[in-house]
Amino acid sequence: MIQFLENIRAGIVQPRALIRAESTKRSYNLQLSKHRDIENVHTAGVNALDVDPMEGKYLLSGSADGSLHIHDLHNFTGSPHFTCKLICKVDRNLRTAHRFSVECVQWYPFDTGLFITSGMDKQLKIWDTNCMRPADMFDFEGRVFQHHMSQIATKNCLVAVASSVNHILLVDLKSGSCTHELRGHNGSTLVCRWSPRDEFLLATGSCDNKVLLWDIRSSKSCLKSLDQHNGMGRSSSEATNTAHDGYVNGLCFTHDGLFLLSYGTDHRLRLWNTYSGTNEMVNYGRVPNDMKKCMQFDITVDSDPKLVYVPSEGNIFIFEIQTGVKVNTLLGHYNSVNSCIYHPFYHELYSAANDRNVLIWTADHCQGAAYDDYLKSQNQNTEPYERRIFVRRNVVADTWSSDEEG
């Protein structure tokens, strides 16, 4: 660390290099935090998580019983031993709550005053955080598995909705109506994700084993149907192209938007080039996945190489994206893990599972010991007030020596 700072001062390396090196070190060394935890208030399995992108301060979670919770992640105590407290919730017994399981939650990208939830009651709700009541509500024909709003959109205010019907719906929050129906899948749509690079590019996954890329400005069908064989399989027809040999229930773009990761019930992860649509043929091995609903996984932001955190049954696997090398396996949950979210400010991971726990994975396992040593040294060096020696200085007096005069 000191050498990095010295090199930055001397102009040998760019300041960004320090951020990348520290992020990489933390991303590779995540462990279950021994000093920080999330207040356990959930009464059912936790299906979805999201950290607000503006301040990185609030953690939003949705449960299988329809309840919603918001925890404060900031630690102002000065001690590494800290419990993130619940600051507000929507109880399942309230009339405004979801009647069934909450499958997806998301903060409004530009303001923590709003957040969006959806679930098995076939509803999408836009919540006012200040009063914790729905500001608007949308009803759909099928159960909603996932929704997503672009983090970079400036010309639209669209929310993509994947549900048990065979088309993707785009809801405009400004007009309060459905503006698009994207038809191309032959089965229930399970996942949808906007590109972090192009505000008009949308990726969707379905029970028909396909991953489709859409440009929502086009009146034609989808841009690409991703083919796991890159056109070298049994058929080159786009109608029969499949990205997986099972349901596609997880999608995630890299932070630069150049690559897309897909996760399927064929127990495979696949890496795709976003612009060419080709399979990069990276072998991640077998990643057990038997869930018939959306799986939320995440990718690091500043680390080099980039890592992906993938929930698999009761474990969380860490892979290098470009090589497929398994870096580590995080063990801590007692039941199936449903969601992983990476905090880009703290470089730590939050995971939620059917065991009703939300866990924090950090790389600060050495900070607690260092803090304890610091306190011990402070206690040993303390002396009575009257025995301390103070040096009084006159801040306005001239301190030049006589030798330097003339």
Image (spheres, grey):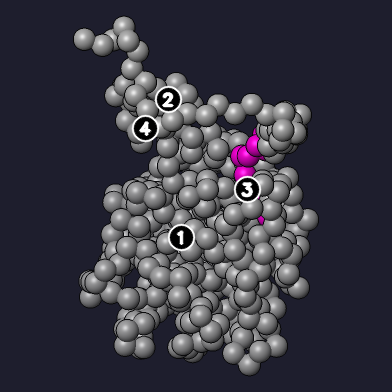
Whole-percent x and y of residue 353? 69, 61
The kind of secondary structure element at disc 3 is loop
The kind of secondary structure element at disc 4 is loop
Looking at the image, tell me whether mark 1 or mark 3 is earlier in sequence order: 1
Question: Residue shown at 28%/59% (left/top)?
Answer: 198
| Nearest-to-viewer mark from 4 and 1 | 4
Residue designated by label 3: 78
Looking at the image, tell me whether mark 2 or mark 3 is earlier in sequence order: 2
On the question of residue 312 being in view, the answer is no
Question: Residue shown at 37%/63% (left/top)?
Answer: 151
Q: Are marks 4 and 1 in contact (CB under 8 Å)?
A: no
Describe residue 220's horizontal placement relative to residue 213 as left or right: left
- Which contiguous range is marked in magenta? 358-367
Q: Foreground: 148 or 267? A: 148
Q: Is residue 360 magenta?
A: yes
Describe residue 351's horizontal placement relative to residue 4 as left or right: right
| Nearest-to-viewer mark from 1 and 3 | 3
Residue designated by label 1: 55
| Nearest-to-viewer mark from 4 and 2 | 4
Kind of residue indicated by mark 1: Glu
Q: Quadrant of the C terminus?
A: top left
Q: Tell me the crowding category of disc 3: few under 14, some 14 to 19, or many 20 or more residues within 10 angstroms, Cα based.
A: few
Residue designated by label 2: 4
Kind of residue indicated by mark 3: Gly
Kind of residue indicated by mark 4: Val
